[in-house]
Image: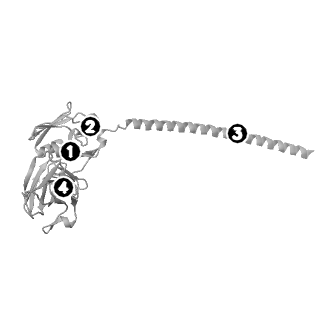
Amino acid sequence: MKNRIIIGFSMLIICMLLVACGKGNEEEVQANEANNGTNIEENEEENNEENEQNEANEEEEEEPTFADEVTVHDINEVYLDEEEVNDFEEDILIEHDQTIYIEQEFITDLVDLEVTYDEDAYFAEVFAGKGDYTYTANHEDTEGSVVELGEIYVDEWDEYINPEDEEVYDFVEYDGKLYFPKRVIEYVLEEPVHFTRRDGILALGKQEELAYLTDVETGGSMLLGDGVISTESKYTTIEGESYEAVATKPEELNTRGLKTYPHSEYAEINGFAYNHDDHPVAVEITDKDENVIGHGEAPAKGKFEFTYDIYGEDEVEIYVRSLSEALMPQPYEVTVYAEFR
């Protein structure tokens, strides 16, 4: 009987201990859940604050401007007709939409021309002799802009020029300054532009590096039929000298013309017409309006050599015709060589 009482009492104690442990675990779980809830709320608040800060930072970031579309190229050396120019600023040459632009004050001072611009009329005028025109910036809020050009008047030519669709004539305002595109400088201001990116060299006017008939666009009656531009030695070796590339057409009876298209990118053309015939031939060099740039004669089995300035010329044609007085002229052959700089 005594043992049963002891066993019963022990079991009661054990039950009480189990109940107490269970209650303790339940309280611990509830405490953990409460802590977890607090942590989640704190994390959510922190995330919300972080998101709000990121949104605020994004709002503070500036909108893209025109200046972001412009590349300012480093210029280390400048040449005009192969003579070094020492006085120039760092930002004289920029690039926008794959077009090169040169700063207005620099280029007009260098070539001694005055270019004025009326933005209300989209109209520019070009006069000989540098004046005191100063461009007033109108697009500082966007850090620059394309400045549209509808027409240019060139006083020396007494002519109005309308921009061609396939060429870039519009100006650019950047950093409060006005910039002219390469096409306007070459065709209107008549100053060829060559820029070497790798070395940061800007060369204006006549170039040291030569271009040949294979480097420029060509055409004309001389290249019809069996006429060719060739670099083969059987054509390019003449009187013991070898030349880069020549145009030739054998067995010709009529006047022939070799058209070249320097597109105002060169200042000078040098070359010759070599006459393979037993009679002299006349040679004439003209521009796109058929104005005569120069002329002469190539004697029998001889050359007519020429050197002419071609600033601002988009097209130069070299005409050759026989001077034979025979009623039935014999076919003749002439080879033309030309280089551009």
Mark sitting on residue 183: 1
What residue is pinned by disc 3?
26
Badge 4: residue crowd in 10 Å (few <14, some 14–19, many ≥20)? many
Left or right of residue 132: residue 75: right
Callout 1 amino acid: Arg
Quarter of the C terminus within the rendering: bottom left
Residue found farthest to the bottom: 240
The residue that appears at 68% across and 38% down in the rendered structure is 27
Callout 2 amino acid: Ser
Determine the CA span between mark 2 and mark 4: 46 Å
What residue is pinned by disc 2?
145
Q: Earlier in the sequence, mark 3 or mark 2?
A: 3
Determine the CA span between mark 1 and mark 3: 86 Å
Q: Earlier in the sequence, mark 2 or mark 4?
A: 2
Q: Nearer the viewer, mark 1 or mark 3?
A: 1
Q: Quadrant of residue 39?
A: top right
